[in-house]
Amino acid sequence: MKKVFASIITIGDELLIGQVIDTNSAWIAQEMNKIGVPVKHRVAVGDVWDDIWQALDEESKSADIIFITGGLGPTADDITKPLLCQYFGGKLIMHQPTLDFVTHLFENVLQRPMIERNAKQAEVPDVCTVLKNEKGTAPGMLFEKDGKIFISLPGVPHEMKWIITDSVLSIITKKFNTGFIEHRTLLTAGVGESFLAEKIKAFEEVLPVDIKLAYLPNYGMVRLRLTAFGMDKEKLNQHIDHQFNLLKENVKDVLVIDEDLPMEAVVGKLLKQKNKTIATAESCTGGYIAHLLTSIPGSSAYFTGSIVSYDNRIKEQLLHVKKETIETFGAVSEETVKEMVKNVLHIMQTDYAVAVSGIMGPDGGTTEKPVGLVCVAVADKNKTITKKFNFRFDRNRNIQLTATNALNLIRQLIVDNS
Amino acid sequence: MKKVFASIITIGDELLIGQVIDTNSAWIAQEMNKIGVPVKHRVAVGDVWDDIWQALDEESKSADIIFITGGLGPTADDITKPLLCQYFGGKLIMHQPTLDFVTHLFENVLQRPMIERNAKQAEVPDVCTVLKNEKGTAPGMLFEKDGKIFISLPGVPHEMKWIITDSVLSIITKKFNTGFIEHRTLLTAGVGESFLAEKIKAFEEVLPVDIKLAYLPNYGMVRLRLTAFGMDKEKLNQHIDHQFNLLKENVKDVLVIDEDLPMEAVVGKLLKQKNKTIATAESCTGGYIAHLLTSIPGSSAYFTGSIVSYDNRIKEQLLHVKKETIETFGAVSEETVKEMVKNVLHIMQTDYAVAVSGIMGPDGGTTEKPVGLVCVAVADKNKTITKKFNFRFDRNRNIQLTATNALNLIRQLIVDNS
């Protein structure tokens, strides 16, 4: 059986001048992988007729399925639709079901007057199959040429995702009898990529050639991913699971979880399992740890609340940190975060709490307390643990690293209590 | 003078299976634009020898500067360095200054034992110019072939950025006498892309052909960007500024700011100018608004703190929302957010405050109060304004939209007070 490959073309000047970060490609790639269609190539071009045309020519040489995202908006800088119409030799016609839906959308949902520009979005090339879009005004379009399929989708992420989930996945799996790709990913924390590589050297040396290992480092954590491909789903799973178990055994002392979950989801999962609650007291992260924890659906079951004490006055008034503590040791000190964490645990009446204070930069550092210095405390009723970090990166990275490391500390405390 | 174009090749299976989102390309594109080098093409390939080789061949056909990011890590899945060595006909040699730096890094900064794998990162092809990397162990490498330059950089964002800023920009501007690209971007809020297009139709119709207009919609806001290219920087600036002033005039009633700033930076800028302070009381956004405000450097000058009251108990105990209010009107009601905002203003002793409560989904909705229902309140000492929204998207999008709209409401209040 022939292996099927996909390619993704993203269209838009905003991608090329760096004003927008492309998150669509990553999502499409994940969905294609799940149905056994590896994405071999991705390309980004501007809103330029010849460049788009050439990308269509090029990508269809090596791929069987070509995704085209972006360039379908109602405004004049979008040239994708007329181009596709010409490329596939069709002419634009009004698509009545889409027009009906767009009309309904404006009348009943958006409750705004519909203008001609919006109605024009219901025009499609007569040589395409229209892919319904219930989340917006621009429908998806599917074209076939020389046994390859071309799928044009709007660039707005939630519209693109809706169309792929609603119709594209089933069209592809029906048309191409694809094989399967399996991935197994685990999360480690606290050691670098090189150290980890040394640790699993022996495992890696005897890893079967049909299984690939990848290191994915990110903010003080490294994910390890095994990938294998095959036509027999059951055999494939047995094969990769066997190697994954060996890998887990090799990294067990730095293993966070044997799933592809972010740290905040791991903490949430543990709290939910054990029916425990958590609160945070945040200075330098400004609510980011609370945001990460509450970004997980269902987090209201374990997340109680947070006091963000950016100003030292709030540390004293709301978190009852002693004035002397701040005066003697400073706001960024293990003594201060210890009081913050104990008091927020008491104020919020939770089982666990996290507190952080640090200097995120670019300004505010001193010789004694440089940018990147962070104190973290985690606590339950019986125990308080504090730890000092020196990150010394830029503001955004320091905030990220503080959050990740604080969440890992509370995770360890929860696990130790089990 | 010949126009110079750049192309970006990103290497890594993690990009193709969608496990990692590529933020590097956007950053590189922004920097290249600033020095007048448009990025015409971007391509992503896996850790596959032939695919990388082909991408180098392809991209060097149309671009003068080819960036290659990723694939330089210390682990076995990285094949980029040996490939580049072969592609440019060199052999690997030890680069002593890099080895000295890596040794220093392990001894004095990381304070971890250095292993052979790390030392190997100091090996480079003898046909390249080494680009110093003070932020990590893998140096950048610059190759020249047929008048084109190839720049290989590590995939870790802060390392890549450091190398480009430290050496790459000056190398490019020296080698290629490039022209200039100018962008002007403004931010609007509260109206959709189509409506905006209708509003500026007349402007767009007479816009000179050498100026491009782009619509960049994002979470309830639309940015409008003008782009022009030229060799005379002063003339270019006059030309684009003239059109930008006309554009501003056309959208003045929905204009947030005439810069490319996110909403949280606009609010921060206003508060700083007026020497005022702000606090938030957040339920459904879980600290996200506080995080946005504190993501801006220098925000400690105006951001005081936040009470994240995820649990209704915390709304009562810490924000002193009356039990009857929640019982009568519910936690998601204009009455509740009104009390939240008034009380947090008083508790934090700030000039302004924002409060939000809503149902972010996917669970927790009812017929009466569906997922996406959000109540927002903003206040100063004299005035409290509440507003109800119906977003009805997914959790992440609902959180984003709530934050953006809440920040826009407080912005309007601050502006109205001026």
Image: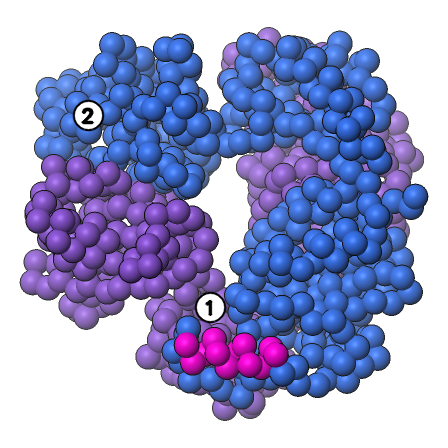
Chain colours: A purple, B blue
Q: Can the viewer see residue A135 in this picture?
A: yes
Front in this rendered view, residue B99 or B249 = B99
Q: Is residue B238 above or below residue B177?
A: above
Q: Position of residue B99 (x, y in %)?
A: 58, 81
Q: Residue at x 82, y 56 (%)?
A: B175
Q: Which residue is mark 2?
A: B349
Is disc 1 placed on a helix, strand or loop?
Answer: strand
Q: Position of residue A333 (x, y in %)?
A: 20, 57
What is the magenta range? B97-108
Front in this rendered view, residue B231 or A212 = B231
Q: Is residue B402 left or right of residue A39?
A: left
Of labels 2 and 1, the one closer to you: 2
Q: Amino acid at mark 2?
A: Gln
Q: On residue A223, which mark appears? A: 1
Q: Position of residue A344 (x, y in %)?
A: 14, 47
Q: Position of residue A47 (x, y in %)?
A: 78, 36
> Which quarter of the rendered picture does the N terminus of chain B lie within?
top right
Q: Are marks 2 and 1 in contact (CB under 8 Å)?
A: no
Separation (CA) of disc 2 from disc 1: 44 Å
Q: Is residue B372 above or below residue A351?
A: above
> Which quarter of the rendered picture does the C terminus of chain B lie within?
top left
